[in-house]
Image: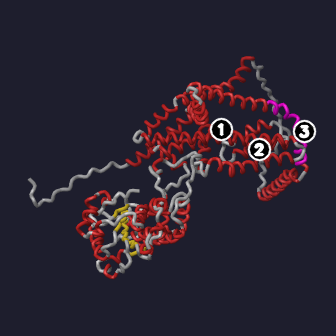
Amino acid sequence: MRPASDPVPPPEQEIEPPGVPGLSGLMTLAVGVVVLAGLYVGREVFLPMVLAILLAFVLAPFVDLMRRWHLGRVPSVIIAVLVAIGIITSVAGVIGFQLAGLASDLPRYQTTIERKIGSLREGSLGKLPNMLRDFGRRFDRAVGDQQEAGAPSSPGTSAPPAEEQKPMPVEVHQPEPTPFQVARDLLLPLLKPFATMGIVFVALVFILMQREDLRDRMIRLFGSSDLHRTTVAMDDGARRLSRYFLTQLALNATFGLIAGIGLWVIGVPSPALWGVFAALMRFVPYIGSFLAAAPPVLLAAAVDPGWSMAIMAAALFVIGEPLMGQVVEPIVYGQSTGLSPFAVVISAIFWTWIWGPVGLLIATPLTLCLVVLGRHVERLEFLDVLLGDRPALTPAENLYQRMLAGDPDEALDSAEVLLKERSLTSYYDEVALRGLQLAANDATRGVLTHRQLDQVRAVVKALVQDLGGHEDIEPPPHETRDEPVASPQSEKPAIKEPAVVGEMPHEDRIGAEWKAEGAVMCIAGRGPLDEAASEMLAQLLNKHGLGSRLVPHEAVSRSGIYNLDMTGVQMICISYLEIRGTPAHLRYLLRRLRRQAPKAPILVGLWPAEDAVLKSEAMRATLGADYYVSAMRDAVVQCLKVATGEEELPQTVTTGKAANVAAAGKRLPLPA
C-alpha cells in the first residue's frame, strides 16, 4: 500500500509515433502519382470518355429542345448524335478535299518561292551569312596564329599522307512492297482514329440516355449529405457548362467563318481549310489564333509575287482575334469564365503532356468542368482553389489581412468592388464585422500586439470615414446566368434580404427630436474593437435620417457615467463583438444606463450571431435590454421602427423595473 505522503505518479501519456504527418503526405503523393500514371497509360480509354462528356454538354440543349417537342428520349438522342456525326463528317470531308487540292497546287508556287528567296539573298539579308562566315574565318585565323606562336615544334611528328583512300559507296535497295503491305500501311493509320471516334459516339449515346442516373451517382459519391443543395448545384453547373460550350463552339465557328471569308477575299488558296483550322485552333488558349495564322500567311507569301497578300492575311488575324477575345466574348460570356489565367496555361501544358495535341484542344473545357465540380462539391473544393479565379481568401479574411498590414487604401479598393453588388449595410454585416471578429478573436487569444491592434483600429476608422459618402442603397442586380461558373450554393443566402431603405418607406415620419445630433447614443462595448463596430452603426443611422453620437466605453463606466450628457437621447445602442460567459458587466451597464435615461429604449447588438446570449431567453431576461440583434441591418430597422412610431415603446420604458425582467429579450430574432 502506498503511503499518503508518496506523490502519485502522473498518468502515462500516450505519445503518437513520429512520422504520421509524413506518412500522410507520402500517401497523398503516391495517390497523385498513381492518378497521373493512370491518365497517361490509360489515355486510349480516358480520352474518348472525356471527348464524349464534352460532346454531351454541347448536345444536351439540343436533346432537351427535341424532348420539349414531344419526341421521346431515344429518338432525341439518336437524332442529336446523327446530326453531330454528319457535321463532323462534313468538316472532315472539307478538310480532306482542301488538303488534296493544296498538295496538287504546291508545285505551281515553287517559282514564286524561289524568286523571293533569291531576292532575299541578293539583299542585305542575304549578305548576312557571308559576313558571319568571313568573321568566323578571321577569328579562326587569329586563333591559329596565336597557337602556332605559342606551341613548341616537335621533331618526331610526321606530316599526314597526301592522299587518303576514299571508301566505296554502298547502296541498299528495299524490296518492292506487296499489295497487302500497301493496304496495311494505308489503313492502319486510319483505323485508330476511326476506332476512337466509334468509342466516343457509343459513350456519347449512353451518357445522353442516362444523364439523370449519372448525376445521381455523382451525388451519391460526393454530396449525399445534402441532396437538395447538391442536386441544384449539379443541375445548375451542367446547364451553365452546356451553354458555355455551345456558345464557345458557335463563337469559334464564327471566327473560322470570318477568317475563311476574309482569306477568300484576299485570294489565299484553300480558304475553307484555313477557316476550319482557325476555328479548331481557337480552342487553344491565348495563342491558338496566332498559330492558326502562320500557315495561311506563309502560303500567301508563296502565292503572291509581292508581300501585300501576306500582310493583309496577317492583319486579318491580328485585328480579328483581339476584337473577338476582348470585345465579343466578354459581352457573350459575362464578366468571368471562372478560370484563373495561370491555371489555363498550366492546364494546357499538363493535358498536352498527358494526351498530346487532342489534350491541348480540350484543356480549357476540361479544366472548366473540374472547377465547376470543385465549386459545388465539398470534397473537390481544392480544384476550385487551385484552378478557379475566385480569391483564395474570403472578403472578411482579405479585409483582416489588410488591417494587419495597415493598408487602408487596399481595404477601400476591395470595399468599392464589393459594394457594386451589395448595399453598405450588407457590406458591414457580411464583410467588415466578420473581419473585426477575426481580429477580436486573435486579440482575445493574445496573438495580436498593441501595435497590430492600433493598425486594425486605424484601418477600420479610415475605411468607415472613406465610405461616408456612399449611399446605403441596393445596387442593380448583377446578372450571372450566362457565366459558366456560378458561386457555390454555400455562398448564396437562402433568402436575399432587401436593403434597409426598401423596408422603411416612411422615413419622412421621423420626428425632429430623432434627427437631432445625439438622439441615438451608440455606446461601444469594453472590447478593444467594439468602438469600431459602434462607429459603423452610427454612420448607418445617420444615413437613414437619425442623429447619432459615438460614445466610448470609458464614458459609461461607474465613475464616468455621471459626467455623461444624456440630454436629448431617444434610444441607446450598445455594440459587442465578443461577450463570453455570463455577461455580468453588461447587466450592470444596463442598470446604470436605466438610471441615467429611464425613458430611452436600449438595444444591444451582439455581432457574433452564435453567442450564447442570443440563444438563451433566460439569460436575455436577466440582462434587461429591450431589443437584441445580431446584424447591423436589424439594428437600423429597429431604430427606424421606434423613431417613426411604427412600433410602440416596450414596457420596460413605461412601467419600470418590474416589467423590465418580464419583457426583456422579446425582440430576438427580429422579424423582417
Residue found 52% across the figure and 70% down from its top = 468
For residue 205, which numbered disc appears in the image?
Answer: none
Where does residue 118 sit, x and y in percent of width and height? 90, 45
Q: List the residue tagged with mark 3.
A: 111
Q: Residue at x 78, y 40 (%)?
A: 260
Q: Distance between the residues labelled 2 and 3?
A: 21 Å
Amino acid tagged 3: Thr
The residue shown at (88%, 48%) is 120
Mark 3 element type: helix
* Quadrant occupied by the C terminus: bottom left
Report x, y in % for residue 339: 58, 48
Dot 1 corresponds to which residue? 357
Q: Is the magenta stretch mostly helix, strand or loop?
A: helix
Between the residue at mark 2 and the residue at mark 1, the CA separation in whole angstroms equals 17 Å
Determine contact: label 2, label 3, CB under 8 Å: no
Q: Is residue 40 above or below residue 477?
A: above
Q: Is residue 452 visible?
A: no
Q: Nearer the viewer, mark 1 or mark 3?
A: 1
Range of the magenta residues?
Answer: 100-120
Determine whether, in the image, residue 110 is placed left or right of residue 207.
right
| Of the pair 189 and 9, the residue shown nearer to us | 189
How many neighbours does mark 3 have within 10 angstroms: few (below 14), some (14-19), or many (20 or more)? few
User: Against 498, is 601 above or below?
Assistant: below
Q: Mark 2 points at which residue?
A: 294
Distance of mark 1 from mark 3, alpha carbons?
Answer: 34 Å
The amino acid on which the numbered mark 1 sits, given as a three-letter code, is: Pro
